[in-house]
Image (cartoon, grey):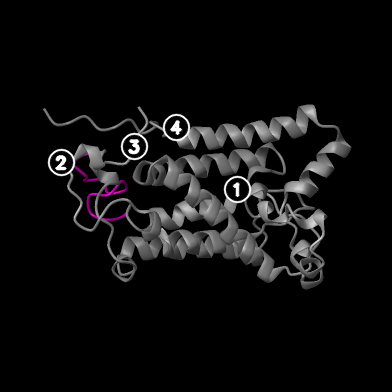
Amino acid sequence: MGKAREPIFNIPAVVLVVLVALGLVHVLRIYVLSPEADRLFVWNFAFVPARYGLNELLAGGWEYAWSIWTLVTYAFIHADITHLGFNAVWFVAFGTAVARRFGSVRFLAFFALTAAAGALAHLVSHMGDIAPMIGASASISGTMGAAARFAFQLGGPLDPWRADGEHAYRIPAEPLFDALRNPRVLGFVGAWFALNLLFGVGSLSIVGEDQSIAWQAHVGGFLAGLLLFALFDPVGPEADFDDDEEAPHIAP
């Protein structure tokens, strides 16, 4: 009898912790804060490109001392339950695979870095804009970019013929340029950019009519996940699949 596959909904604890944090922030805003307090909360923790103009940076007053944290904190704020639910589904789908490979600490650092990359991409394209940006989409896009580096390989998590669910998350990743020659990786990356092009210049939207999709932040997060994957990957080029002590943590 062959080995049983790992349950598909065995979500790593770190992914659940992030989901709970996203949910608690939304509950706080809807059920605890007054409308005025909520507006202040969003203003203080969302990413506002206008804060990073040259004049503001030169001023260096106390009111800007905390702004650097908004490079990450904006990712924990969502417009409504639809926005939060949509992001949660994709975060579970791709964050699970990346968290199983990276482990909890690396995954949290990766989440923060891809959020910051998305914020910087949004800043470059919206310099001086006073409208706040919110949502975890940049970090979720980062997990998609990271998953593209290993999930489509022979024996990887998205290979239907893989022999073992646990080892699928520990296969050595191909170098970036080799991975980009994989037709499945190219197809995934191409489809991802096409979808975000629809978000950016088309009519596709998942938020209200008075809200816009920060697709540049998606691109920044995705490219950071794709290009910086090796900085977080604990699996060496010649990983020993029999050494359980070196395996990334997988939540039971």
Q: Which residue is mark 2?
A: 242
Q: Earlier in the sequence, mark 3 or mark 1?
A: 1
Displayed quadrant of residue 88: top right
Q: Secondary structure at mark 1?
A: loop
Position of residue 212 relative to residue 82, above or below, is: below
Three-letter code, disc 1: Ala
Distance between the alpha carbons at the discs numbered 3 and 4: 10 Å
Are dots 1 and 2 in contact, CB under 8 Å? no
Label count reads 4
Q: Earlier in the sequence, mark 3 or mark 2?
A: 2
Query: Horizontal placement of 151 versus 218: left or right?
Result: left
Three-letter code, disc 2: Asp
Are dots 3 and 2 in contact, CB under 8 Å? no
Distance between the alpha carbons at the discs numbered 4 and 2: 24 Å
The image position of residue 95, as x and y in percent, is 45, 44
Distance between the alpha carbons at the discs numbered 1 and 4: 18 Å
Are dots 3 and 4 in contact, CB under 8 Å? no
Residue 136 is tagged as 1
The image position of residue 42, as x and y in percent, is 77, 45
Q: Secondary structure at mark 3?
A: loop
Query: In the rendered structure, which segment of residues is drawn in magenta?
Result: 152-164
Q: Earlier in the sequence, mark 1 or mark 2?
A: 1
Three-letter code, disc 3: His
Residue placed at 45% from the left, 46% from the top? 107
Are dots 1 and 4 in contact, CB under 8 Å? no
Indicate which label's residue lies in the foreground, 1 or 2: 2
| Magenta stretch, overall SS | loop
Q: Which residue is mark 4?
A: 13
